[in-house]
């Protein structure tokens, strides 16, 4: 089957002077402190940092799941910070794919039905060919009729990726996509993410603690205390990434 993903400049993500705080009074925590960063179309970026560094907040703001207190978040020429709640929900559903560490598949639905769910929630009737293309992109065409309980952890995560891709998102965000997987399954999921970038020019952004995951990315951003403090590029070896993380944790 021939598979395609349409690509446009919509895949360009830009955070401009983004800040985010939590708490009140004397208990305010600055999760993001005037962060400006871009994720170009057709690239794979990994976000790393110690616990509390702001990496999850950065991804949630970039994905429109959280609103910054200051700054702007753009996907293409759309500033999500200027959208109302209903507009933002619709925009996320149609332009942003999000993959959770825990898969979040509906147990009573088959792989194909889980993949089709975002389109149904958007009031559309998905074509079988659309679902087939999404499953083919992650190498699971032969598992369409299987329930999640009949799939391995790696296969379930790949169904979750297919579900995130069904709406042809401008960008795919993944929160610790291999965190709940064994080594073999992790390698397969990473290969699929890398293939989406290399073959289909999908923009992928992931938060991870795993240097092996980060080593598959085109770029690694390091956060500390709510700021981007370092950046590696050009497929940095996992050993070097691990060494940089160890420096913070020492």
Image (cartoon, grey):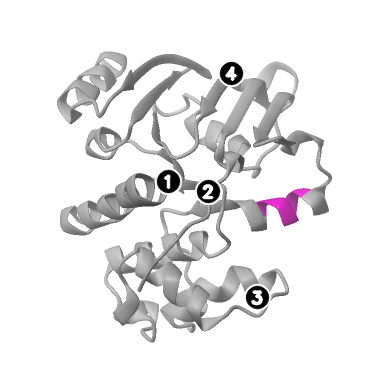
The residue indicated by pointer 3 is 120
Q: Of circles 4 and 2, which is in front?
A: 2
Of labels 3 and 2, earlier in sequence is: 2
> Does the rendering let one see residue 23?
no
Labels 4 & 3 near each other (Cβ < 8 A): no
- The crowd level at tag 4 (other Cα within 10 Å; few <14, some 14-19, many 20+) is some
Of labels 3 and 1, earlier in sequence is: 3
Taking the spot 23% from the left edge, 25% from the top edge, the residue there is 236
Asked if residue 195 lies left or right of residue 83, the reply is: left
Please, what secondary structure does the residue beneath circle 1 have?
loop
Taking the spot 47% from the left edge, 24% from the top edge, the residue there is 53
Of labels 4 and 2, earlier in sequence is: 2
Labels 2 & 1 near each other (Cβ < 8 A): yes
The residue indicated by pointer 1 is 201
Question: Residue 247 appears at what percent x and percent y?
Answer: 26, 14
Please, what secondary structure does the residue beneath circle 2 have?
loop
The residue indicated by pointer 4 is 35
Q: Of circles 4 and 3, which is in front?
A: 3
Please, what secondary structure does the residue beneath circle 4 have?
strand
Labels 3 & 2 near each other (Cβ < 8 A): no
The residue indicated by pointer 2 is 7
Q: Considering the image in quadrants, where does the C terminus appear?
A: top left
């Amino acid at each position: 089957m021939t598979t395609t993903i349409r690509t446009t400049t919509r895949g360009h993500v830009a955070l401009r002077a983004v800040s985010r705080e939590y708490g009140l009074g004397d208990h305010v925590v600055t999760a993001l402190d005037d962060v400006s960063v871009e994720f170009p179309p057709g690239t794979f970026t990994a976000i790393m940092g110690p616990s509390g560094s702001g990496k999850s907040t950065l991804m949630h703001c970039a994905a429109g799941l959280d609103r910054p207190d200051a700054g702007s978040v753009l996907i293409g020429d759309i500033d999500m910070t200027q959208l109302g709640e209903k507009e933002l929900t619709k925009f996320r559903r149609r332009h942003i794919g999000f993959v959770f560490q825990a898969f979040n598949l509906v147990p009573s639905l088959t792989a194909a039905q889980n993949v089709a769910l975002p389109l149904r929630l958007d009031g559309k009737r998905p074509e079988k060919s659309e679902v087939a293309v999404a499953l083919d992109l992650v190498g699971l065409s032969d598992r369409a009729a299987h329930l999640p309980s009949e799939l391995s952890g790696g296969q379930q995560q790949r169904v979750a990726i297919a579900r995130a891709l069904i709406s042809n998102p401008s960008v795919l965000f993944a929160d610790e996509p291999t965190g709940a997987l064994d080594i073999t399954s992790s390698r397969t999921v990473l290969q699929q993410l890398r293939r989406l970038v290399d073959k289909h020019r999908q923009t992928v952004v992931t938060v991870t603690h795993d240097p092996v995951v980060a080593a598959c990315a085109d770029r690694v951003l390091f956060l500390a205390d709510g700021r981007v403090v370092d950046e590696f590029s050009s497929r940095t070896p996992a050993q070097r990434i691990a060494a940089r993380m160890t420096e913070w944790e020492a």
